[in-house]
């Protein structure tokens, strides 16, 4: 019964996207079917096959080794933050960014990461028949994060139509940043974090195509290449990268403190109305029907729905911190679907960031077009997370 609900959920989520589509007649059913099959193959390989699980364990091992090395740098400067029985959130989840972000930026500086992204993007375009840049961007936004991917893509976005810019804004709702994956794995099961990443890429392509289906003529389907003769020296670049990592840690820390404090304040106000009312309970009611379609009974669904709703109105860090104490009581299926759902930047605050980034790189007409279609960003952000969670849930029981 629960497995049947999980299967039905995939079709329900696709049905919601089709219902809200800007032009259902332009949806390429073959493309959607191809991407879905691709998704099932990836999920089955990473969760059900011995080789796939071994790959996940190997990647997780590399990540953990990098994080362990980063702790040595923290311990050198602040030993009493590391040499303790239990490291705090800032130390365990965020301080490794001081090494991981410069590492990823170094790979970008020398052209290694962009080349990998471009190759994978071209392969995706051949398989899906979707425009080259949209496939390229789906990888780019997941590896670099939208704060880097949108500015880096500014020359391409400036050459594209407003509707195509909207497609990229829709996809941006489901991005993460490879540099921050290590932080996620310190809070949630790493095998499901790593599995969520490729599924989010594919599902962002599916949902953005369904919600905003476009026919791009061949003459407009190109990748703008810019030779950057003004590239700074490596050490100047590295210094800026390290400072950016420090800013990222500060921003995440203050955002978590602020959102947790505000949530506690709202809960305190709600208890004045009734002790049974809380922010988590309200959000749980909103997300409850969706959680049921992830293959859970009503009790399980409500527990997971509360955390899912919390993520959408705050951010994934707040939700992951809230989930940590509950995970030991969850079965494997619940842990899998919840972890995958939380693995993205999709929340209401992300919309403002996306609009702000586009304002800095494209003209006002394109920004206005995106602003008039914000509902598609919200719908896509939620549905991509639900689709990825539902697909993984099929293979984890």
Image (cartoon, rainbow, N blue to C red):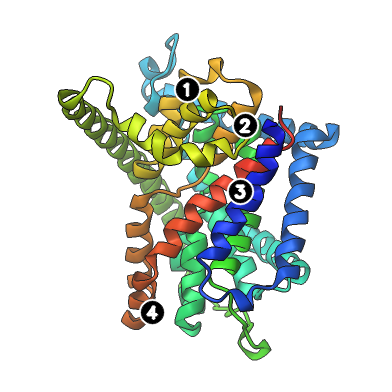
Measure the C-alpha gap from mark 1 to mark 2. Answer: 13 Å
In front: mark 1 or mark 3?
3
Q: Is residue 8 left or right of residue 358?
A: right
Q: Which mark is residue 204?
A: none
Measure the C-alpha gap from mark 3 to mark 4. Answer: 29 Å
Q: Which mark is residue 324?
A: 1
Q: Nearer the viewer, residue 380 or 282?
A: 282
Q: Earlier in the sequence, mark 1 or mark 2?
A: 1
Q: Earlier in the sequence, mark 1 or mark 4?
A: 1
> Dots 1 and 3: beta carbons under 8 Å?
no
Q: Is residue 105 visible?
A: no
Which residue is depicted at the point 75% across and 39% down?
46
> Dots 1 and 2: beta carbons under 8 Å?
no
Residue 4: give x, y in percent of width and height: 71, 38
Q: Nearer the viewer, residue 315 or 181?
A: 315
Query: Could you classify mark 1 by the number of other residues whose Cα lies within 10 Å: few (under 14), some (14-19), or many (20 or more)?
Result: few
Residue bearing mark 4: 366
Please say if 308 is above or below 129: above
Please say if 123 is above or below 388: below
Residue bearing mark 2: 336
Q: Kindly state the secondary structure of the residue where label 3 is placed.
A: helix
In front: mark 4 or mark 2?
2
Please say if 27 is above or below 251: below
Measure the C-alpha gap from mark 4 to mark 2. Answer: 38 Å
Q: Quadrant of residue 226?
A: bottom right
Residue bearing mark 3: 387
């Amino acid at each position: 019964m629960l497995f049947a609900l999980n299967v039905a959920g995939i079709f329900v989520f696709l049905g919601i996207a089709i219902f809200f589509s800007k032009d259902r007649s332009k949806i390429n059913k073959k493309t959607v079917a191809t991407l879905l099959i691709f998704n099932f193959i990836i999920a089955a390989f990473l969760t059900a096959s011995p080789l796939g699980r071994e790959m996940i364990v190997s990647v997780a091992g590399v990540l953990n080794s990098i994080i362990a090395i980063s702790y040595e740098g923290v311990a050198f400067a602040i030993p009493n933050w590391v040499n303790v029985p239990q490291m705090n959130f800032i130390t365990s989840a965020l301080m490794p960014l001081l090494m991981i972000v410069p590492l990823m930026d170094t790979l970008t500086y020398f052209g290694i990461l962009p080349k990998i992204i471009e190759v994978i993007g071209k392969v995706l375009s051949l398989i899906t028949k979707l425009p080259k840049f949209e496939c390229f961007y789906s990888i780019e936004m997941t590896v670099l994060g939208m704060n880097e991917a949108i500015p880096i893509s500014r020359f391409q976005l400036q050459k594209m139509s407003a509707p195509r810019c909207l497609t990229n804004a829709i996809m941006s709702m489901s991005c993460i940043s490879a540099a921050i994956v290590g932080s996620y794995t310190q809070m949630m099961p790493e095998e499901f974090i790593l599995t969520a990443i490729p599924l989010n890429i594919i599902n962002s392509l599916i949902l953005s195509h369904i919600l905003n289906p476009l026919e791009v003529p061949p003459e407009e389907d190109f990748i703008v290449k810019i030779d950057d003769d003004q590239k700074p020296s490596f050490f100047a670049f590295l210094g800026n990268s390290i400072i950016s990592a420090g800013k990222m840690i500060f921003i995440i820390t203050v955002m978590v403190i602020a959102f947790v404090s505000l949530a506690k304040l709202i809960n305190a106000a709600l208890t004045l109305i009734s002790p049974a009312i809380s922010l988590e309970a309200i959000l749980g009611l909103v997300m409850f029907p969706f959680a049921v379609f992830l293959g859970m009974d009503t009790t399980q669904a409500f527990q997971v729905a509360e955390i899912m709703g919390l993520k959408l109105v705050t951010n994934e860090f707040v939700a992951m911190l809230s989930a940590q104490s509950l995970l030991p009581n969850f079965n494997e299926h619940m842990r899998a679907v919840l972890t995958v759902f939380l693995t993205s930047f999709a929340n209401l605050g992300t919309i403002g960031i996306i609009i702000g980034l586009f304002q800095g790189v494209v003209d006002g007409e394109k920004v206005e077009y995106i602003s008039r279609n914000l509902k598609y960003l919200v719908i896509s952000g939620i549905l991509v997370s639900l689709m990825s969670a539902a697909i993984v849930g099929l293979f984890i029981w």
